[in-house]
Image (cartoon, rainbow, N blue to C red):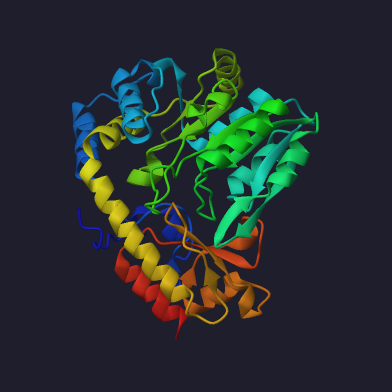
Amino acid sequence: MNFDQIVDRKPTFSFKWQKYQGKDILPMWVADTEFRCAQPILDALTARVEHGVLGYTLPAQYEPAKQAVASWLQKRYDWRVELDWIVWMPGVVPGFNVACKACCEPGDKVMIQVPNYPPLLAAPQLNQLHRVDIPTLEQDGRWMLDFDELEKQAADPKTKLFVLCNPMNPVGTVLSEAELARIADICRRHDVTLCSDEIHCDLILDEQACHLPAGKIEALKDNSITLMAASKTFNIAGLGAAFAIIPDNTLRRRFNQAAMGIVPWVNVLGLYATEAAFTLCDEWYQRQLEYLRENRDYLVEQINQIDGLRVNAPQATFLAWVDASGLGVDNPQAWFEEKGVGPSPGTDFGNKQFVRLNFGCPRDYLHQAIARLTR
């Protein structure tokens, strides 16, 4: 449980590290962490592999993983879910693409908050739908939805779906109960289904904030798809395991039908890893939260001392949305890379004057990044 440990990922063909292969650029972009998995997860995977037979395992029939999800949601969010509400997905990206197919007909409109991460921005067009952007506005050091625009666009009869990211990626906001109630009211009045991507929900860094799952809200219970996973929290994204919570039978049936023949089963190792993460790793999880809070505080303090850069402390995730407009350069991404730091380019999220920095890494990497940015 040593989060300072540096693990060499270069020989593993890591997506994050392959991008800058052969260059002196520290990769701080795609949203996985540099932390070694909790030992109980590794033990569970080892035991399953050593069994020796890796044939078909139907996720819906693997009761231990479903029970682990239900127990985790009750313990973390006081949300009692029935096991048949759980629909396994090989990732949240397939999840919100399936939601587009399940809730819309070609030519319909889908509301997406912006900025947002690239696969979510791309989903409407991939499914022959029109994307309607709902801006995110800065208010008192915190980013929030433009509710006036949300109300306006939801009123369009062609608008059938709102895909929300909560906690928000890349801006790191955790929606309050009052804010979610307002979203629920808008969706209910205009008959818009909410698909809530909550993949970072277990990574709440602001100790005054708490996560409220969309499907737990009574007004959204029959009109929501809540997407979650252990992948970001426990650094098991490469195993391709996520799940949707869909309380309403009709919506769940439409969702399952939209996925048929297209979306593969979650693989057996992903199921075992999720089960172990949600049942055996509480101490590791709490220690990681403490480490990430310290990383965030250090990074925010240091970035805000660099001329031309500005960042609000994210309430959640391990991602910082850095405003580089003060640099006065046309391409902030190139400016960072010339300094030897590789963030995610803001243009991919909808604003080229920003970059997204991943601080889910050993503290030494942050020290290196700040040293490079200030040299």
Please say whether residue 262 is visible from this viewpoint.
no
**Residue 29 appears left or right of 72:** right
Q: Is residue 139 above or below residue 330?
A: above
Seen from the viewer's position, the closer of residues 118 and 269 is 118
Circle count: 0
Seen in the picture, residue 178 relative to 246 is either above or below; the reply is below
Give the residue at the far bottom of this rendering: 375
Residue 187 image point, x, y percent: 67, 31
Rendered view: 82 above or below 72: above
Q: Nearer the viewer, residue 213 or 334?
A: 213
Q: Position of residue 77 (x, y in %)?
A: 38, 34
Instruction: Tell whether 357 sits left or right of 13.
Output: right
Quadrant of image for the C terminus: bottom left
- Quadrant assignment, res 10: bottom left
Q: Position of residue 373 (x, y in %)?
A: 47, 79
Q: Quadrant of residue 233?
A: top left
Name the residue: 34% across, 35% down.
Answer: 76
Image coordinates for residue 184, horizontal then vertical, percent: 61, 32
Query: Does the rendering let one see residue 163?
Result: yes
Residue drawn at x 36%, y 15% as measured from the top left:
61
- Residue for point 69% across, 33% down: 127
Left or right of 242 in this view: 142: right
